[in-house]
């Protein structure tokens, strides 16, 4: 067993050096001390407990919320020659028994387990009889009611400190604001541990937000122009919409699969397996999909509906570009999305929790309506300062703004004068002076403000109403046909104490940044492009034979480095990032032969 962290990093995992605070975190854990690690998706959190696990004499128990996450991690570790196993309810009884026997026989270095399984069937009694060296609590935000993915079973993990007082614990998450961080520390009894906070920035992701104007056509245009043959994820709110969008993508020549809780277990597992093991698959899914997905070459994440908060948005978009190569986070939203989410927030919530959820959703809306750098706003939410990124839609095409204070007041007046009983369509008809049956029946064509908004288009009024909703100046009552109602927050605007600024150009266009085209790797010549394609074909062939995802063998980034460096010996191949000793011995000659033949 190698004893030095850097030796393990280079020889087992194939990376030349640690990134950021990884080395410091590992040294801290090896000193038998607790830690809370905040690191972005793709930032290398797993190494912070996997390397100590290979140095400690005993077992490292990794607590993870999703079976998919466990399976991906175990598969990747075994490919590296590491003794890893998972224990979950989805396994046959005989397989579970075999894993327990291996644990008892000290044949497992890392055991992945769900929190509910940890507390079931006397498992703690088993752990007390063997040497446990470390507990790693992954997706630690699940313990916090401030977090976006609270799971009650995570609350019981505070018992680890009491039952195993001398075993260090490392809690890890990619998404936690200040309140969530404090909550994690208190609920897991990590108050005396150390917090390591890395930058939440994902500079390789380009952020785009646009207003809805035929969302399906917008999505098709985005994928066709930017990611025609790439793997991606499209998030939708409802199961019905997932099925519809997936079908439309297939009709237009893309390879798409649906994923939602309404599918049976076998179909969900099969679709996920295809997504992981084949190239260029677009998964259309509800938020039931993706938390444990470790696929590095997802080139885009698209949202056709609003998430509930910025943490969820950050985590979901973080599934793009985990390999560090350019990727897109694209979202379209409209007025109805705001109303739907706010309506959902009121379901089975205490008053205090509801206030938290509304506060978090309002932060997301502010992000969407933000006229300045999106990355700067996103990082500020996580208490991190940054300069303008130059790689989001607002930076690439600076929004033109216009003072719409008078129009905003006119819209608020129209809502009030019509009795706060009508939806956006009716309000806009009144403002534009449209003599509809509904307007005439209600005698709203006799109002003094009837037709006073003709200087704006229907689309512009929709945008103003959407921004009034986003700023909580107006609420939409979904139980009363979507009628708009004023809130106390609009008083300063009506009194002339505030101004109201809007985006002049409402439809943003995709623009490629200086990072290059997100959808593809650009090589200097056809020969390099040809070699890259052949290396990918070889990788896919090997992956299919081994029944594992291609990225488990080598990431795209590793293949790209092979193309640029053209290694001719196993020693030279070992210098490529991602080529550890086990993979060099297993696959090295096959990839060298392909390079030499090209």
Image (tube, rainbow, N blue to C red):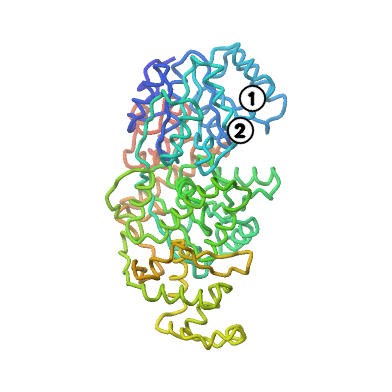
**Viewer-closest of 364 and 332:** 364
Q: Are marks 2 and 1 in contact (CB under 8 Å)?
A: yes
Inspect this view and state whether residue 569 appears.
no
Q: Residue at x 39, y 55 (%)?
A: 207
| Pointer 1 residue | 119
Q: Residue at x 58, y 33 (%)?
A: 71
Q: Where 51 sits versus 72, above or below? A: above
Quadrant (top left, top right, bottom left, bottom right) of the C terminus: top left
Q: Residue at x 64, y 42 (%)?
A: 269
Q: Where 56 sits versus 10, above or below? A: above
Q: Residue at x 35, y 56 (%)?
A: 392
Quadrant (top left, top right, bottom left, bottom right) of the N terminus: top left
Asked where in the image residue 105 lies, by quadrant, the reply is top right
Inspect this view and state whether residue 575 appears.
yes
Q: Which mark identifies residue 153? A: 2
**Viewer-closest of 163 and 26:** 163
Q: Residue 456, image x and y in percent?
A: 41, 80
Q: Residue 487, image x and y in percent?
A: 49, 64
Asked where in the image residue 518 lies, by quadrant, the reply is bottom left
Looking at the image, residue 346 sits to the left or right of residue 397; the answer is: right
Query: Of callouts 2 and 1, which one flags the residue occurring earlier in the amino acid sequence?
Result: 1
Q: Residue 288, image x and y in percent?
A: 60, 46
């Amino acid at each position: 067993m190698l004893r030095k962290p850097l030796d393990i990093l280079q020889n087992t995992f194939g990376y030349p050096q640690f990134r950021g605070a990884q080395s410091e975190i590992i040294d801290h854990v090896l000193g038998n001390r607790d830690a809370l690690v905040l690191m972005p998706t793709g930032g290398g959190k797993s190494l912070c407990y996997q390397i100590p696990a290979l140095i400690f004499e005993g077992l490292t128990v990794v607590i993870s919320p999703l079976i998919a996450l466990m399976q991906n991690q175990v598969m990747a570790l075994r490919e590296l020659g590491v003794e890893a196993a998972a224990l979950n309810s989805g396994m046959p009884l005989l397989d579970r028994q075999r894993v327990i026997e291996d644990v008892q026989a000290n044949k497992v270095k890392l055991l992945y387990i769900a929190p509910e399984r940890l507390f079931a069937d006397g498992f703690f009694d088993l752990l007390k009889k063997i040497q446990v060296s470390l507990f790693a609590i992954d997706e630690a935000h699940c313990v916090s009611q401030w977090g976006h993915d609270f799971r009650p079973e995570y609350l019981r993990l505070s018992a680890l400190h009491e039952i195993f007082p001398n075993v260090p614990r490392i809690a890890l998450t990619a998404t936690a604001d200040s309140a969530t961080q404090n909550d994690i520390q208190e609920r897991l009894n990590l108050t005396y541990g150390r917090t390591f906070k890395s930058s939440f920035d994902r500079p390789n992701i380009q952020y785009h937000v646009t207003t809805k104007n035929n969302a399906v056509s917008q999505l098709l245009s985005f994928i066709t122009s930017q990611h025609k043959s790439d793997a991606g994820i499209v998030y939708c709110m409802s199961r019905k919409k997932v099925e519809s969008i997936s079908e439309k993508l297939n009709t237009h020549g893309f390879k798409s699969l649906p994923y939602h809780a309404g599918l049976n277990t076998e179909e969900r597992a099969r679709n996920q397996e295809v997504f992981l093991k084949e190239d260029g698959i677009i998964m259309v899914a509800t938020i039931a999909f993706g938390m444990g997905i470790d696929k590095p070459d997802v080139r885009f994440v698209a949202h056709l509906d609003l998430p509930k908060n910025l943490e969820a948005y950050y985590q979901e978009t973080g599934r793009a570009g985990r390999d560090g190569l350019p990727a897109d986070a694209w979202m379209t939203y409209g007025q109805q999305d705001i109303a739907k989410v706010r309506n959902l927030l009121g379901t089975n919530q205490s008053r205090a929790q509801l206030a938290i959820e509304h506060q978090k959703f309002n932060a997301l809306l502010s992000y969407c309506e933000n006229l300045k750098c999106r990355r700067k706003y996103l990082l500020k939410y996580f208490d991190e300062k940054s300069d303008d990124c130059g790689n989001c839609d607002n930076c690439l095409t600076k929004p033109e703004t216009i003072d719409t204070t008078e129009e905003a007041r006119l819209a608020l007046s129209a809502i009030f004068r019509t009795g706060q009983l009508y939806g956006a369509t009716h309000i806009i008809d009144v403002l534009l002076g449209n003599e509809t049956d509904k307007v005439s029946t209600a005698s709203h064509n006799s109002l003094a403000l009837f037709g006073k908004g003709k200087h704006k288009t229907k689309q512009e009024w929709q945008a103003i109403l959407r921004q009034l909703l986003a700023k909580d100046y107006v609420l939409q009552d979904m139980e009363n046909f979507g009628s708009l109602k004023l809130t106390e927050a609009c008083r300063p605007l009506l009194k002339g104490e505030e101004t109201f600024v809007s985006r002049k150009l409402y439809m943003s266009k995709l623009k490629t940044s200086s990072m290059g085209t997100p959808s593809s790797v650009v090589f200097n010549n056809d020969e390099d492009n040809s070699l890259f394609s052949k290396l990918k074909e070889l990788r896919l062939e090997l992956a299919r034979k081994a029944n594992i995802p291609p990225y488990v063998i080598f990431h795209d980034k590793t293949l790209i480095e092979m193309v640029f460096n053209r290694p001719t010996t196993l020693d030279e191949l070992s210098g490529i990032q991602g080529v550890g000793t086990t993979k060099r011995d297993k696959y090295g000659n096959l990839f060298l032969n392909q390079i030499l033949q090209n």
